């Protein structure tokens, strides 16, 4: 009974004290923002806009050091960027994260995931921006055409007179090779 009375008095005295004080959550803000056990939260600057939708894929090639792509800006088609594959120092703005080829094997349906700053997104081919150009003429051995002059006689190409109709020439016989007879 004595033990019961002592424990009752201890509980009565503990109950007479004020309840524990609660603190607002922001008091512990520094603990979860600057924790030595976790990475700090990634901060995206508010003034940086995502303009990945303005870029279109126009070139894709595989090299020994990874996949290289060529991007063109839809708003300004003269703005063209070549992005090397892998982690290269040359890729200042863009970085290739993933290349997803089309399962059917069509190169025009390939999707490339790129990163520009803190933004990531897919870039694909667009047929409006793909143009087929003629190959440039080989340098050096291009035929030189003569300009017509007033002194060119009529009948010759570039002459001032009427051209004579070309006479039909018979088809040439195939050339035979002379092989001397053994003696």
Image (cartoon, grey):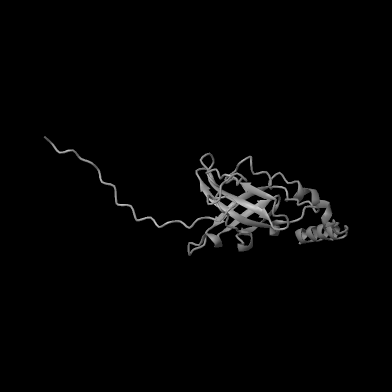
The image position of residue 63, as x and y in percent, is 51, 45
Q: Quadrant of residue 99?
A: bottom right
Q: Nearer the viewer, residue 135 or 22?
A: 135
Q: How many marks?
A: 0
Out of 114 and 6, give the one closest to the viewer. 114
In the displayed structure image, the side of residue 104 where residue 49 appears, left or right: right
Looking at the picture, does residue 126 appear above or below residue 178?
below
Q: Quadrant of residue 36?
A: top right
Residue at image x 66%, y 52%?
Answer: 115
Left or right: 164 as drawn, with respect to 150: left
Q: Position of residue 155 (x, y in %)?
A: 53, 52
The one nearer the camera, 24 or 11, is 24
Where residue 16 sits in the image (x, y, percent)? Answer: 88, 59
Residue furthest to the top: 183
For image coordinates 61% across by 41% down, the residue present is 88
Q: Where the C terminus falls, by quadrant? A: top left
Residue 138 % position (x, y)? 52, 44
């Amino acid at each position: 009974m004595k033990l019961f009375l002592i424990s009752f008095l201890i509980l009565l005295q503990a109950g007479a004290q004020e309840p524990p004080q609660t603190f607002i959550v922001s008091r512990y803000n520094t603990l979860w923002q600057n924790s030595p056990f976790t990475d700090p939260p990634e901060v995206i600057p508010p003034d940086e806009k995502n303009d990945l939708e303005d870029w279109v894929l126009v070139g894709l090639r595989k090299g020994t050091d990874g996949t290289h792509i060529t991007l063109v800006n839809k708003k300004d088609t003269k703005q063209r960027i070549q992005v090397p594959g892998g982690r290269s120092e040359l890729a200042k703005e863009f970085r290739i994260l993933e290349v997803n080829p089309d399962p059917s094997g069509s190169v025009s349906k390939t999707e490339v995931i790129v990163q520009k700053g803190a933004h990531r997104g897919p870039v694909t081919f667009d047929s409006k921006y793909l143009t087929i150009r003629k190959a440039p003429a080989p340098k050096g051995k291009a035929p030189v055409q003569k300009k017509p002059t007033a002194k060119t006689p009529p009948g010759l190409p570039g002459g001032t007179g009427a051209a004579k109709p070309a006479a039909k020439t018979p088809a040439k016989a195939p050339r035979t090779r002379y092989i001397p007879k053994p003696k």
